[in-house]
Amino acid sequence: MFRKKEYLIETDPACMPDTSFSAAVISDLHDGTSAEFLRDLAQALREERPALVLCTGDQVTARDGRCRMSQALRFLMAVSGRYPLYCVDGNHERRLDENRRSYGDAYDVYTEKLKKAGAHLINNRSEYIRQNGMLLRISGYSPGQNCYRRTCRKTITEEMILEKLGPRENDGAFQILLCHIPDDFPSYARWGADLTLSGHVHGGIVRLPLLGGIFGSTLRPFPTYDRGLYTTKDGRKMIVSAGLGSHTIPLRINNPRELIVLKFRGRESM
């Protein structure tokens, strides 16, 4: 089963205070969930009736030359038929694309079916959407596999994001950034993301009171960003999903799977 975790997101005072809507965040399905689980997840979305659904990557599992994506793909295609769906790649989707000798055309099959279903694939690009009078700019940053290495990983810098996405636009839009890996939150904030949505760490897999997650998918002990809400001194936020699936280590202790629901509301002017 999974829990539903809600976060209130207050936007710029220029937005009307009575502007409100919800968005759902799906991360790390890993195609390892049962059909019953996916039916429950679909029912939770129907009950929530989000204005849009945001996917932060690793919906498939690609490991040792084998790819699992059929269940996740059917689920996402169905979701795209009901809600605007925005997706960015995680490291498993990147593995499919960057290691075609091992995985063949699996990445092309995955992306083409999602596109035909109407999904918005925003790897290293941005789209605007206006919802209830609020202008959102949704951007996806998809780094290469070298940024996911367990050892000697390449740190994501503000300059790397600028190279792919350009500068944060000064157009009054609330800037949402989807990036699967949370490790480089300071760079995302400096680039100008008002809200970053990430996953990847699976909540730390095993969580201890006060200490948080013991290790994540990188196997580094006590990751800095494992699950929940993080805020910079100037108010920029990142929410890290504990994810909805698992793969290599099928274990969760004090760490339920979660569907994140964002409640957007215009901030009252002072």
Image (cartoon, rainbow, N blue to C red):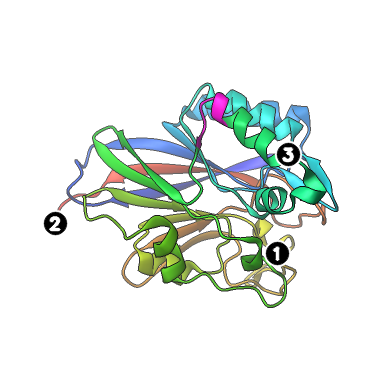
Foreground of the two, 214 or 211: 214
Residue depicted at x 78% and y 33%: 34
Q: Horizontal and vertical percent for residue 239?
A: 49, 56
Mark 2, other Cα within 10 Å: few <14 / some 14–19 / many ≥20: few
Amino acid type of disc 3?
Asp
Q: Horizontal and vertical percent for residue 245?
A: 72, 45
Residue depicted at x 60% and y 48%: 57
Q: Which mark is residue 105?
A: 3
Foreground of the two, 213 or 15: 15
Q: Horizontal and vertical percent for residue 233?
A: 35, 73
Query: Do residues under tags 3 and 2 come within 8 Å of each other at their CB atoms?
Result: no
How far apart are the two marked residues, 1 and 2, measured between alpha carbons? Answer: 41 Å
For disc 2, the marked residue is 270
User: Can residue 237 be seen?
Assistant: yes
Amino acid type of disc 1?
Gly
Q: Is residue 47 left or right of residue 14?
A: right
Specify start and end residues of the magenta stretch as a single range: 115-120
Q: Can you tell which of label 3 and label 2 is closer to the viewer? A: 3
